[in-house]
Amino acid sequence: MINFGLGHEGERDDALVTVFPEETEGFESGVVLLPTGVAELTPQARAELALETVHAAATRLGCDRGWVQSARDRARAHVLAAGLRYRCRGPAKTSPDRKHVAQAVYAIYPDGYGRAVVQIRRRDDGTVVAVSPLAAEVWCGYLKDFAREPGKLRWPNRTTIAYQPGMGLSIGPSGATVRGHDRPAQIVVDRARAGAPVGHGGLR
């Protein structure tokens, strides 16, 4: 993992990336000096800048560490192929009647906050038949922690799925970010009552 410190240098028109050859407490580290106007960039442009910054830092560190460059190039290509969007799925749980599968789906939005929805799919053809309200996470933390709570997903009966989000997650009206650290609410999806989902089932 590389930890970056961010700074601002008003006269720059590019980003300056500096990495340090020594590890600190097992972490790689670096500093990124950003130019004026970064906050006004479009989400796509900010994502591209973030990707190139990380790629440049990893490439420079790789020269000192002896890392294989092709692995970093494949990682960069994977991010581009995904449209510079992070999305993942938690473990699936099958309904008591074995006809449906429920799964939490996670994404990180351009504002840096994580979002989650719960989808219910038919087992036979994979069609999404119901989706929960959108939930917002205040801080994603490490990506490995973002979708690591499969024990929170359960079927109280054959038509209803209940999901208890992790720390920092709470249901937000119309997908609005919920700030603060209140106790997270439970997401409940009733397959018999929910309408058909649109697009990615609540996630952009």
Image: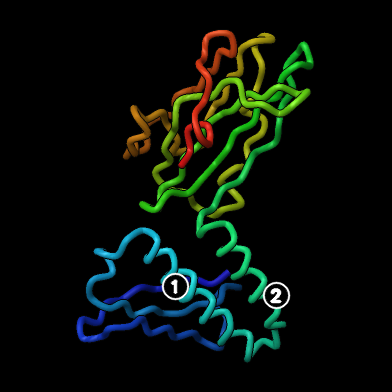
How was the colour assigned to the protein in this rendering? rainbow
**Does residue 71 appear to the left or right of 195 in the view shown?**
right
Q: Residue at x 50, y 16 (%)?
A: 195
Dot 1, crowdedness within 10 Å: few (<14), some or many (≥20)?
Answer: some
Q: Residue furthest left?
A: 10
Mark 1, residue position:
4
Q: Nearest the camera: 25 or 199?
A: 199
Mark 2, residue position:
71
Q: Is residue 39 above or below residue 202?
A: below
Position of residue 198 measured from the top left corner of the image (x, y, whole percent): 49, 29
Q: Which mark is residue 179?
A: none
Where residue 185 sits, quadrant-wise, is top left
| Label 2 close to label 1 by CB (< 8 Å) | no
Q: Residue at x 65, y 38 (%)?
A: 90
Q: Residue at x 62, y 26 (%)?
A: 128
Position of residue 148 measured from the top left corner of the image (x, y, whole percent): 63, 42
Residue type at mark 2: give it. Answer: Ala
Q: Is residue 169 above or below residue 140?
A: above
Image quadrant in which the N terminus is located? bottom right
Residue type at mark 1: give it. Answer: Phe
Question: Sequence order check: which comes first, mark 2 or mark 1?
Answer: 1
- How many labels were placed on the picture? 2
Q: Nearest the camera: 25 or 121?
A: 121
Name the front one of labels 2 and 1.
Answer: 2
